[in-house]
Image (cartoon, rainbow, N blue to C red):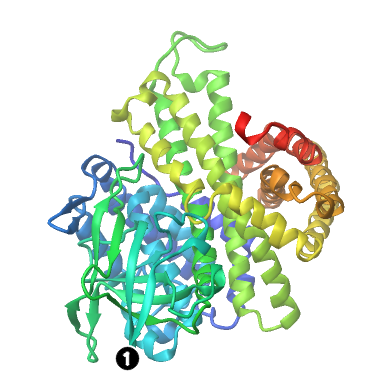
């Protein structure tokens, strides 16, 4: 199995140059986020990823998590790795200090999260979901509840889940049927939840479930959903663990990938009812859960980039070793890295990973500004950017993961189809990322419906102005690469403007239009954002190359990657714009019964 080498230098570059961590560190509460501290954290996170988590990736894929006598048993080494992970403080990076967290920027947490998921995606899902549960509870639960649960969730002593889906209710949460009956200071919950990632395991002493259910007087639909904390083991007043709650795993899903991550069917209330505690106000569970889901969507986006990075490293390693055929200008038989088409594939992987990483981390930094900026207007603008970018980060980055991991198999040729090489695992693991936390279609509809049409393009207009100003800066840059990069970026930005204007002008007249064009619009937006940030990387790299002692290879490669993206990837925006302006067209042209 291939080793993993965390891309610390590129993560540092994105955080320092594109996210501009110095500005993040100037926000109230982030004073400790000095460049030296950020660098040290990334280096230590890389050691954890490279040395502890990566060696377990193949083990987990082969052994799977198993349900034994009603309990989930994780693969060999996972429980010990988790204890080391928690004891090292990795569960608390961006968590609130009043409950034992380190209070560092979310963007830094997301950078580390890429490494967890690249090294071992199955493992990375567990702390990711716990962090999302913390986010929702911190925002919406009362002080007494948070005192009981958050300290141990943040320390990693316990883990958390989100329990939304039921057999009859996939993405349609209006169909949730789980019930919650009042019983004194708590509720008794009954129902079945499916697809619960890390819903049970042997790595910690307790698991805290956030469960959607309906009170007896709940109205129909999503307005009647409440959110409850349901611990696996009840918690005594002194913080010790009490009786086992009436919630248990009844089966594990047999999945295409992420085999070490137990995806549970959970049964609540087979006996008297699972004891749960209401979070916040009744009937507001869906809005509370969206706090958790939007946090998770940003992390899922970077999860896609993580597994894509791992697939790229594996493909490069194989291409440098595999001897096959002859190449112009080379003596004798060559390794396949010398073939032009293989280089095209490897450069495509590299460019997409670097673009996705930049978009994901810049989007995550908007979370920091939205929550910590003291100036009201600046905070509002950051919130608008966060809202607009979240579905793009989640969906576009995970769609890239499908392409990159698929190319990784292709680089290996026939050996890519053989499990022992490891390339297939990344392809299989990546496949879920476009589905959970809301499919690509759901994210695309969210981008158009809630983020573009709802404010009549106001958030987009701010971004458009920023990108237009940047284009002017690019056009003024000298050198052989920048005229090409700026020309292609300018063309892509114009495609985005045309597509956006079309949607804003026509959506009100065609109820099917937003759904029909949303995928193409989201992908178009992602490619434009990626082009913007890689072009910005090239500008910054050119400035660094003028300094003494610069890492010439690193910065020249950043410029070369940006130009490749501009020439080979950005033209995709034309196809997506064409799909948008085609409107509903023939999408609804064939009757449902004839499809």
From this view, report whether residue 313 is shown above or below residue 12. Answer: above
From this view, report whether residue 574 is shown above or below residue 232. Answer: above
Question: Residue 231 location, x and y as percent?
Answer: 29, 75
Question: Residue 378 location, x and y as percent?
Answer: 73, 76
* Quarter residue 328 falls in: top right
* Quarter residue 127 falls in: bottom left
Question: Residue 3 location, x and y as percent?
Answer: 33, 40
Query: Relative to 140, is 426 on the left or the right?
Result: left
Question: Residue 18 location, x and y as percent?
Answer: 64, 58
Query: Relative to 123, is 102 on the left or the right?
Result: right
Q: Could you say which is closer to the camera, residue 471 or residue 169?
A: 169
- Per the image, label 1 sits on a secondary structure element best described as loop
Residue in view at x 69 percent, y 77 percent: 379
Q: Quadrant of the N terminus?
A: top left
Which residue is tagged 1? Answer: 184
Residue in view at x 63 percent, y 40 percent: 556
Query: Relative to 64, is 435 on the left or the right?
Result: right
Does any portion of residue 553 appear in the rendered image?
no
């Amino acid at each position: 199995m291939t080793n993993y080498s965390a891309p610390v230098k590129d993560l540092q570059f994105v955080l320092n140059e594109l996210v501009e961590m110095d500005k993040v560190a100037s926000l109230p509460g982030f004073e400790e986020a000095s460049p030296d501290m950020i660098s040290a954290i990334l280096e230590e996170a890389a050691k954890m990823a490279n040395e502890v988590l990566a060696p377990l990736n193949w083990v987990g894929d082969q052994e799977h998590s198993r349900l034994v006598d009603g309990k989930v048993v994780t693969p060999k080494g996972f429980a010990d790795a988790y204890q080391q992970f928690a004891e090292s403080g990795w569960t608390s990076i961006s968590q609130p200090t009043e409950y034992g967290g380190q209070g560092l920027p979310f963007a830094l947490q997301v950078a580390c999260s890429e490494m967890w998921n690249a090294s071992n995606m199955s493992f990375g899902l567990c702390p990711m979901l716990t962090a999302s549960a913390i986010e929702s509870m911190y925002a919406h639960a009362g002080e007494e509840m948070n005192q009981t649960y958050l300290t141990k969730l943040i320390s990693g002593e316990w883990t958390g889940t989100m329990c939304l889906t039921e057999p009859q209710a996939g993405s349609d949460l209006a169909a949730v049927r789980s019930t919650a009956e009042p019983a004194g200071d708590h509720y008794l919950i009954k129902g079945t939840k499916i697809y619960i990632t890390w819903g049970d395991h042997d790595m910690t002493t307790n698991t805290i479930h956030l469960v959607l259910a309906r009170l007896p007087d709940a109205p129909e639909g999503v307005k009647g959903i409440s959110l409850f904390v349901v611990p696996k083991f009840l918690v005594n007043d002194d913080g010790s663990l009490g009786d086992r709650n009436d919630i248990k795993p009844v089966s594990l899903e047999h999945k295409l990938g992420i085999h070490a991550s137990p995806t549970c069917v959970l049964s609540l209330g087979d006996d008297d009812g699972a004891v749960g505690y209401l979070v916040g106000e009744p009937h507001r569970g869906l809005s509370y859960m969206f706090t958790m889901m939007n946090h998770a969507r940003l992390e899922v986006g970077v999860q896609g980039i993580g597994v894509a990075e791992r697939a790229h490293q594996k493909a490069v390693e194989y291409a440098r070793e595999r001897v096959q055929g002859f190449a112009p200008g080379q003596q004798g038989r060559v390794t396949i890295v010398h073939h032009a088409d293989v280089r095209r594939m490897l450069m495509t992987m590299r460019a997409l990973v670097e673009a996705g990483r930049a978009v994901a981390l810049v989007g995550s930094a908007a979370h920091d500004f939205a929550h910590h900026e003291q100036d009201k207007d600046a905070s509002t603008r950051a919130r608008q950017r966060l809202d607009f970018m979240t579905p793009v980060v989640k969906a576009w980055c995970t769609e890239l993961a499908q392409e990159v991991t698929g190319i990784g198999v292709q680089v290996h040729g026939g050996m890519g189809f053989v499990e022992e090489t490891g390339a297939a695992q990344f392809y299989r693991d990546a496949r879920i990322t476009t589905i959970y936390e809301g499919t690509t279609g759901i994210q695309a509809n969210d981008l158009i419906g809630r983020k573009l049409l709802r404010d009549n393009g106001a958030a987009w207009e701010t971004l458009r102005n920023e990108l237009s100003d940047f284009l002017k800066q690019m056009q003024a840059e000298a050198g052989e690469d920048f005229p090409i990069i700026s020309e292609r970026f300018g063309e892509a930005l114009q495609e985005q403007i045309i597509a956006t204007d079309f949607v804003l002008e026509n959506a009100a007249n065609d109820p099917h239009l937003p759904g029909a064009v949303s995928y193409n619009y989201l992908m178009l937006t992602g490619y434009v954002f990626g082009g913007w940030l890689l072009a910005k990387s090239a500008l910054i790299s050119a400035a660094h190359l003028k300094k003494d002692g610069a890492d010439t290879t690193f910065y020249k490669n950043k410029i070369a990657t940006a130009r490749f993206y501009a020439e080979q990837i950005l033209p995709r925006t034309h196809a997506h714009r064409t799909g948008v302006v085609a409107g509903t067209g023939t999408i609804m042209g064939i009757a449902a019964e004839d499809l």
